[in-house]
Image (spheres, rainbow, N blue to C red):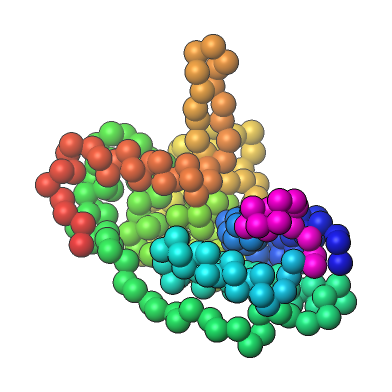
Amino acid sequence: MTRPLVELVEQFCQYQLKQRGKTEGGVQTYRWNLEQFLLFGRARFGRVARLSDLTKAVIQDWMDEMAARDLTLGTIRSRQSTLSSFCAWLVKREVLPANPISGMDRPPHRIEPPKQVPTSALMDALIEAARKRQRPRDVAIFLILRFSGMRRESVATLQARHLDGLWGLRRVRVKGGKTRDIPLPESVMRYLHAYVAQVLTPSVTTVAPETPLFWSVWGRRSIGKHRAPMTGEKHLAVVQTLWTDDRLSHVEAA
């Protein structure tokens, strides 16, 4: 029971990623939540957290410490839930005799609407701004967001194989590692196919089914430019750049 928890945490995260098919973003959340417990254990015991620290008393003290720091109920619930999943995984592998979180009080789950939801008018303004700035990649991204409501990571990591004629997108990876078929207007699909032919194809050696649709280019004069497939974070940067454009200052978010 003196086994360091950090090793088991990494094994759990790799299991979620490679055997359960969870997304990179989801696994990063698991790792972050569990690292908060490891940090708590180090601060409390003055050493690295151990398997023997997974007791109801220690976990309750962690919950009380988070509440004392005025963390939101959603944050506390998420961290406790992740730790519970980790403990259940350890029980299945006969590393723990029982899940110490079973029977503990859970913070209530409250679904609150987002404070800001981009309106159709705002999305149309973003599309128009991207057109005027002659950014076909950004136009394609905003068109998909406008008519699908997909998460930014799902859009940013689309591949050529996801395009299904003029119908829409097939087998798109969404939250939880699941896949969905997402219909799109024919006009949007025509634009996406034109983007592939006129923008993507000239920039890559061969467009294969696994070729990412969206790429980023960045760098400095001293090291040159670097080009790589987009990620959710890169996509967010694009959105923020156009969001703050003075040409959109008259558009209000809901």
Seen from the viewer's position, the closer of residues 83 and 178 is: 83
Q: Position of residue 143 (x, y in %)?
A: 35, 54
Seen from the viewer's position, the closer of residues 14 and 91 is: 91
Q: How many marks?
A: 0
- Quadrant containing the N terminus is bottom right
- Quadrant containing the C terminus is bottom left
For image coordinates 23% across by 37% down, the residue present is 245
Q: Where is residue 31, by image quadrant?
A: bottom right
Q: Position of residue 65 (x, y in %)?
A: 53, 64
Above or below, 11 against 132 in this view is below
Look at the magenta stretch and give its main secondary structure: helix
Above or below, 79 against 131 in this view is below
Q: Is residue 50 magenta?
A: yes
Q: 166 left or right of 159?
A: left
Q: Position of residue 152 (x, y in %)?
A: 45, 55
Above or below, 135 against 82 in this view is above
Q: Is residue 62 magenta?
A: no
For image coordinates 57% across by 15% down, the residue present is 223
Q: Position of residue 98 (x, y in %)?
A: 78, 82
Q: Which residues are magenta?
A: 40-52
